[in-house]
Image (cartoon, grey):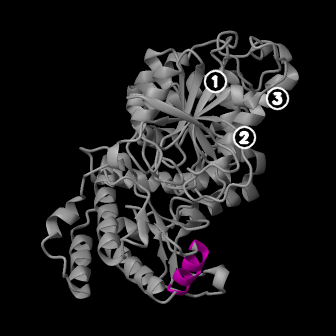
Amino acid sequence: MSSTSSVVGNTDDNNNGLEIKKNYNFTVFRGKQEENNQIEKKRNELSLKYENNKMLTNEEMKEIAKEFDNLDELKDFRKEFNFPTEIPEIEMSNVNNIIYFCGNSLGLQPKQTSEYIQRELNKWSSMAVGGHFTDKNKTIKWFEGDEPLRETFKKIVGANSVNEITIMNSLTVNLHLLLSTFYKPVGKKCKILMEEYPFPSDMHAVTSHLLTRYINNKDWINKEEGNDKLCMEDYILLVGPRKGENFIRSEDVIECLRENHEEIALSLIGGVHFLSGVCFDMKSIAKTCNELNIVCGMDLAHAVGNVPLYLHDWNVDFACWCSYKYLNGGPGNLSMIYVNEKYSKKSMEELPRFIGWFGRDAKSRFTLDTVTFDLREGAGGFQISNICPFNVACLLASSDVYDKVDKQFPNESIMEVLRRKSVKLTNYLEWLLEKEINESILEILTPKDTTKRGCQLSIRLRGIDSEFVKHQLFKRHIIVDTRRPDVIRVAPVPLYNQFMEVYEFVMALKEVIANK
C-alpha cells in the first residue's frame, strides 16, 4: 500500500462535514484511495436474512423487534437503570416513555446510586473522620479509595491483575500525567501519532504538554533544522481517512506507524473514534508499536464498556478513560488508568511520575518521612490524592450491575455477553435505516463491518440540519446526540436499550425527514 500526505488547515476538504474554524497545519497520513472508492462489501446479518422481503410492512418490522426483545438475554438489566423523565431543551417534564440513545455521551443512572451515596453521607454525618477506616452499614472504607472497584473494572478492560488499573482524577488530567511519564522524545524520534480530529480535549492535552515542556526546557526540542523555536507541527503526526471516505482505517494507522517509526515516539489513538464510531484494531496497533519501539497509549473513553478489551494481552503500555459514558458512573465522575505490569516495579528514576500520598504504600502513607517513598505497586503508584467516596459510591452502583452480568453468565466474560447483544442491536438499527430512509439523504459514516465498530452509528442526513432533527426528535421523546452541521450519533446500549426503541426511533426519524 502506498500513501499520500496532506495538510489540515482552515480549508481542509476532508473534515467529515464538521465546522472547523481554526486548526494547526499538521501533516496528515492518508492511505491510497482505492478504485471506485469501494470500502466494504459486508452486509449485516439482518439485511441478508430479510433481503427477499423488502416490502415488509411496518407491523411486520415491529414484530421483528418484539421477537428480538423477547429473546434478549439481557432484557432484565434494563430495570437496573433510571430513565430520563424530562427534556429541558423543549421544557418537557414528567414523561415516562423517553427513548435514550445518548449513552455514548452520558450513561444512565443505576437505580442503586442514590442509596449508595446516601450511605456515605450518613456515615460522614455520624462518624466524620472515623469513616475512613470502617465499612460499617455496607459503606466504603474511604482510606481504601479505589480498592472496592478494581476487580470488576479489571475484567472489563482485560487487565491481568488489579495492579494494572487504578481510579483517579478525570480523563484529561490523567492523560497529562501519563504523557509526562511515557512521552520520551529523543532526537528526531519525537512525534506523537493521533487520529485526525480526535476528541478536542486530547489535542488540547497534547499541544499544551508540548508547549509546557518547551517553556520549561527549550533544550529538549529537535534543533536539527537549526530552529530553536517550538513548531507544534514537528511533534504531532495525524492519520486520517482516505480521500472520499468517512472513517480512518486501522491498516492505515499501522502503515503510518511503519513508514514513520523512526520519528514516532508515542502512539495515542482512541480505541473507538468519538465522531465516526469506527473501532480501531487495537491489538494490531499495539503489536506494531511493540515491534517498532513506539510507546503505545490509548484513550478508551468510547471503547470501555462498549467493546471487549484485552489490554494486557495486547501489551498496551498505558491507557486512560472516563467512567461516565458506557460505564454509567455519573457526569464528570472519576477516570481510570491502565499501566502495563511490566512497569509495576519501576523506580522513580526508571519511570518518573508526579506523586502524592495516595501513590504511597498504605502502610507508610501517614509517615512523616518525606524522603523515602514506598510506591504502590503498579498503576496505583500513579495515584496522587484520595478520591471522593461519593464518586466511588456512584461507580460502585455501576460495578454492581456488571457483577450481576458476570454472575448470570459465569462461563463468559462480561464484555463478550454485552457485545453479543450490541452487535444485533446496532445491526437492526442499520438495517432499518437503510430500508426506511432514502439513500439520497442517508449516509452512515460508521463501518458496516461489525468488527470495526462499537454500538454507535454516526448518521449524516444530507441537506438537513442536525439541530433541527434533534429538536424534532426531542418532541417525540427521543434523545440523541448531534454534531453540526448534519451528523447524528445514535448509540443503542445493550444493558438498557431495546429493539423496539430502535424501531420507534427510525420511524420517528422518517417522519421528521418527511415533514422537514
Give me the residue at 60% from left, 48% from top. Answer: 140
- In this figure, which residue is indicated by the disc labeled 3? 212
Name the element at disc 3. helix
| Horizontal side, residue 189 vs residue 464: left or right | right
Q: Amino acid at mark 3?
A: Thr
Q: Nearer the viewer, mark 1 or mark 3?
A: 1
Per the model, the C-alpha gap separating discs 1 and 3 is: 16 Å
Q: Position of residue 210 (x, y in %)?
A: 75, 28
Point out the residue furthest to the front here: 35
Q: Amino acid at mark 2?
A: Tyr
Q: Earlier in the sequence, mark 1 or mark 2?
A: 2
Magenta-drawn stretch contains 315:
no
Name the element at disc 1. strand
Q: Nearer the viewer, residue 325 or 470?
A: 470
Give the crowd class for mark 2: few <14, some 14-19, many >=20 residues within 10 Å.
few
Q: Nearer the viewer, residue 360 or 193?
A: 193
Magenta-drawn stretch contains 469:
yes
Per the model, the C-alpha gap separating discs 1 and 2 is: 15 Å
Q: Position of residue 6 (x, y in %)?
A: 58, 37
